[in-house]
Each structure stands twice: as structure tokens, then as C-alpha cells.
Image (cartoon, rainbow, N blue to C red):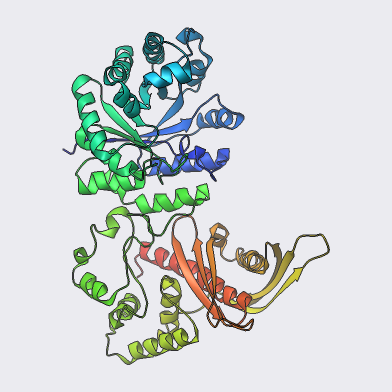
Amino acid sequence: MKEKVTIFDSTLRDGAQAEGISFSVDDKLRVLKALDKNGVDIIEAGNPGSNPKDIEFFERLKEVELKNARICAFGSTRRPGVKAEEDMNLERIVEAGVPVAAIFGKSSIFHVTEILGTTQQENLRMIEDSVRYLKSRGMEVVYDAEHFFDGYKLDPEYALQTLLSAERGGADVLALCDTNGGMMPHEVEEIVKTVCSRVNTPVGIHAHNDSGLGTANSIAAVRAGARQVQGTFLGFGERCGNANLSQIIPNLQIRMGFDCLPEDKIERLTESAIRIAEISNFSLSGREPFVGKSAFAHKGGMHIDAVMKNPSSFEHIDPEAVGNKRRILMSEVSGRGTIIKMINEIDPSLDKKSAETTKVMDRIKELEYQGYQFEGAESSVKLLIRKILGYYKPFFEIEDYKTINEKSAGDNLTASAIVKVSVKGESIVAAAEGDGPVNALDIALRRALTNFFPQLKDVRLTDFKVRVIDSGATASTVRVLMETTDGQEIWSNVGVSSDVVEASLIALTDSLEYKLLSDMERQLREYRLI
């Protein structure tokens, strides 16, 4: 059997401290459900008494049923000179009614005397008393040894004594925290190995990414004996962020043979990353290892040829193992084999010599001459191929549109749009206001279509880039690259015109058409009709 490494996710607590992240209560509930669906063991939900939002969140948690995860409340050890049973922070953790508590205490003499302002012995009593009290109330207790590695380097024996105090109190896990994020992997591995030889309680690791080593330090700790890994699912957190669980989990499970998530859950890793990024309003980098859009993207002709023959030539794992997919990028260096792969996804009977293939290639070359660039816009390429091969019928057609920009003296610029579309022989007119003409068009178009296609209400733009192709004049051709998500997948489309609004509308229309086509094909596969 594989050895278990418990995954402790702190997206809702440590992640919420990241600059630019602001969860509503509903956001936190959605993230919670996404993490539970992905099979995470423990979800740290926050401090139940720290603010009105968390108070409401813990109250609403009582109505939530989870299938995989245990909820954890966060807090600190008791205050100096106060009995554990009289400490308000500890009482709020108990009143939260969750099965797990994570409490932090001081490991460094510097923090004990200079920051906490108490004695070394009182700090040890605070740790032991707090853990013992929470255990007496029937809770599983994770003791977070704050600044442990810095404290160990300052005074190894005292740092170890803080852990032994938590152990005497009955802690279930001793989590060693690289709070400042300044440790090197070899230091972490050496110190964790020493700790594991001195304690009888399972050891965990809580790493920050201030040196860019959060993932490496977490893996080093597991190599040395740690069996719980704390982090945030996408790595965001205070300062430079926390250890990134979407990197750590597949490295430990796929590459190193540990049991982190159920086998059927790790295949949902990419889906979960996109979903959590969407809820968090966090821009998921295409170059994010394992779960990014570009993680398994191939552009160079020689690379593509090799991957077609044997994927392991340029891929360290099978993309589907983490729910991602291989992408073959259209570009000037990708070669003819790239387009035939896309064609074969639609019509497997065609080859490089087919007349239809030549027709597709000629049309792509013509569009590239006009200024289109299909690298990173495979959705537009797939729609184009279907149209040329006769495998496509549009879901809707835009009959007319108008955008209006207005600015009064002293007022902000406002934009509105009117769109007339035809769906199943019926004409619909919709209008909307937005932050600029493209946003107004987007809102108006989806307003016109959602009665026919309700799934479009979940679609939103995540990135929008405009590039002038023929520079030097206001009448230049522009290329718009648009990235879209429905909270489950991310796709990109391209539009080109001498008018930036028209170029945007071309990309926007392709984006919505691609979503509808993908949903239709998914349903047909479910009913085994294709």
C-alpha cells in the first residue's frame, strides 16, 4: 500500500491573507465545496472569532455536508497568564463545532521574549495547556510551530522543547512552519529528519514561498519523514504566497508514489484549479505546472513530431493524469503535422494529402496574412476547420449591432451596446451598459442568448489583449486575443479587423460558439451518440 501524506489546505485562511484576494462568505463556501470534491483531507476554514465574516461562515458551515474533508478552525495558544479554559480564542474554536483545531505557538526564543513578551517556561506551558484543553473537548489538534526553522537555527533545543510540550498535551500533528519562507531544501530536510527522531507524534510541514522554494521545501520535508503537508491550493497567500498544493500533490503522488488524494480525485486537479481560481478572481498562469493551460503545450515542429510519436519524449507525465490536456500550437514553426492532428479530431479519415486538408491550410495561411495569429487560440482554429469541412452549423447569427460611447463634462465615460441576433429563426434584440464597448457587447450578447442557452450565464472573459499589427496609423489592423472561462475550462479565441470593436466581437462570438459546441459534444458523448 502507498504511504499516506495528509493534505491540509489553507486557501480559506492563509490564502485569504494574499494581496488582491477577498472572499465573500458565499465564495468561501464554493471554495470549500471545490476542495472537498477534490478529496482534500483537512480544510482550514479560518479563525471563528476574528471577524463578522468568519463568524457567519462558521455558522453556515453547520448546514454543509462534506464527503471527503474535515473542517479545521484556526487560532493561537492561550494568552500568557490566562487559563486555557478561560481563553476566549480557544473557546471560540470549540464553539465552532468543527472536528479539527489548528493552533499556533512560538518556537523561537526571539519571538517568545521580543514579540510575545513572556518567559520561555510560560510559553512551554501555554502550548501544552492549550493543546490539552482542545483535546479534552474532543478535537483533533494540529499544532503549528510558528517560525520553527528560524527558532531551531537560533536555539535547537528550545525549539524541540516547544514540540515536546505540544506532544505532552496530546497533539495529533506537529506542523513545522517556515513562516518567513527563507529556508533551503537541504536545511529543511536535515531539520525535519532530526525532529522525527526526537518526537513520537506525526510531523507536518507548513512552507511559505518567499524564496521561491515552497514546493521544494515541502517535498524535502516529506522525504525526511513529514506526513502532513500544509499549503494553499494555488499557492497564493501573504507576501509571496504559500506552498502550492496543486504542484506538491502530483509530485508526491505521481512522481514519488505517496497517497495524497484518491486516484479518481487527482484526475480532477486541473478542473479544481480552474474552479478555485475563478471563485477567487485569481489569474491562473498558463505556465502553472501540471494545471496551467500551457503546461503540456507544444509549438516547435520537431517537438510536435516527437510528441506525436511518443508523448514521453517531451512530457514528464501524461496530462490526463491531472485532468489537463495536450495542446499543439499553431505557429510558423509548428509544421503541417499540427493542423492534421486537429483535422483528425473532427474527421479521422483525412490525411496530409487530402484536398480538404489543403483547403484548410490555404485558408489558415490566408487568415495569417490578414493578421490572424492562431497560437494560443486553438478554439478559433477548431471552429474554422469545422466550417471549412462542413461539420458546423452556427448556434446563432449576429444580424446587427451598435455601440455608443458617451462622456459628459466631469462624468466618467459610459458605453452601451445594442445587439440583434437570430436564434432558431427568431430575432432577439438586447441592450446593455458596460465598462467600455466590448464589455457592453459581451453583456448584451449573452443577455440575448441566455434564454436559449442558459449555460452562457456562467461564461466570463478572463483576459483581453489587443495588438496593432500594422503600426504607425490610426487605421491599422488590430488583433484581439480573448481568454474565456466557464469556471471549469479555459479557452482562447482570436479576431482581426481594422476596427477594434469588430475584432473583439469576432473573438467573442467564436468564444460563445465554442462553449456551446463543447457542451453539445459532451452531452452526445455522455449518451454515446459520438
Residue 446 visible in the snapshot? yes
**In this rendering, position of residue 270 left or right of residue 415:** left
Q: Relative to 428, does residue 179 appear above or below in the rendering?
A: above
Q: Relative to 102, does residue 421 appear above or below in the rendering?
A: below
- In this view, the residue in front, 244 or 26, is 244
Relative image position of residue 362 (x, y in whole percent): 39, 90
**In this rendering, position of residue 125 left or right of residue 28:** left
Relative image position of residue 297 (x, y in whole percent): 33, 66
Residue 260 visible in the snapshot? no
Q: Relative to 63, does residue 514 appear above or below in the rendering?
A: below
Q: Residue at x 46, y 19 (%)?
A: 114
Q: Where is residue 196, by image quadrant?
A: top left
Q: For the view shown, which residue lies furthest in the bottom direction?
A: 355
Q: Where is residue 319, by image quadrant?
A: bottom left
Q: Where is residue 341, by image quadrant?
A: bottom left
- In this view, the residue in front, 102 or 522, is 102
Relative image position of residue 212 (x, y in whole percent): 36, 45
Q: Residue at x 35, y 50 (%)?
A: 269
Placement of the C terminus among the 4 image quadrants: bottom left
Q: Residue at x 45, y 34 (%)?
A: 65
